[in-house]
Image (cartoon, helix red, strand yellow):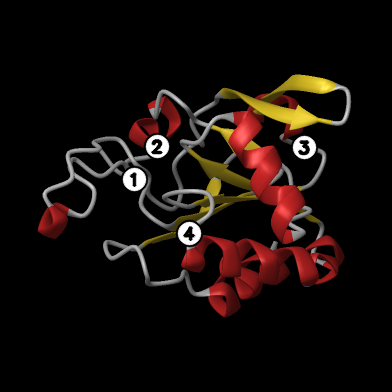
Amino acid sequence: MSIKVGDTAPDFTLVTKTATGPALVKLSDEIGKSNIVLLFVPMAFTSVCTAEFCDISQGISAYEALDAKVFGISGDSPFAQEAWAQKEGITLPLLSDYEHDVARAYGVAYEQFLPEANLIMGGVPKRSAFVIDKQGIVRFVDVKDHPKDLPDFEALKTTLASL
């Protein structure tokens, strides 16, 4: 079941890789500190995902000015995410949904990723964006079925500006 605007954001705890080692990030610990943007992408080291997260990293001040913290989520290991971030200059926190539980909880997991290539790879997250307000309520949802399609970042920022 997909998450809709007005739903309470499902809580999760995911691993991120920091300079001092792996660390846990729990969504409920972040709620109330700022608005939250969750950006799901299919895979590290792919062209569209890299371009998206590099663009967000370069423009992070626009999100900070809207009182938002941005998290990137993929099914890659935190070690692969760290290597990707270092190679490409990605600065936003990357969260590893290695078991794809969060993608499923948010209703954005592919049953079969790239079926035209006969790839099984179930659970890979669809490229999607969620805005969660300081009360933990989802205020914006944009889920893309095709992995090359980007979320509507202008609409996302308009939502943040209204909070």
Q: Which residue is mark 3?
A: 32
Marks 1 and 3 in Cβ contact (< 8 Å): no
Task: Please report the residue visible at 34 percent of the width from the left and 45 percent of the height from the top.
Answer: 108
Question: Separation of disc 2 and disc 4 at Cα?
Answer: 18 Å
Q: Is residue 159 above or below residue 15?
A: below
Amino acid beneath label 2: Ala
Q: Quadrant of the N terminus?
A: top left
Question: Separation of disc 3 and disc 4 at Cα?
Answer: 33 Å
Task: Please report the residue visible at 11 percent of the width from the left and 49 percent of the height from the top.
Answer: 118
Q: Which residue is mark 1?
A: 108
Q: Work out whether mark 1 precedes mark 3 in sequence or the reverse, and give the earlier one.
A: 3
Q: Is residue 60 above or below residue 108?
A: below
Q: Nearer the viewer, residue 156 or 23?
A: 23
Q: Work out whether mark 2 precedes mark 4 in sequence or the reverse, and give the earlier one.
A: 4
Mark 3, mark 4: which one is toward the viewer?
Answer: 4
Amino acid beneath label 1: Val
Q: Secondary structure at mark 1?
A: loop
Q: Nearer the viewer, residue 109 or 152?
A: 109
Task: Please report the residue visible at 48 percent of the width from the left and 68 percent of the height from the top.
Answer: 48
Q: Which residue is mark 4?
A: 46
Query: Residue 7's x, y, as percent?
Result: 44, 41
Q: Which residue is mark 2?
A: 103
Marks 2 and 1 in Cβ contact (< 8 Å): yes
Amino acid beneath label 4: Thr
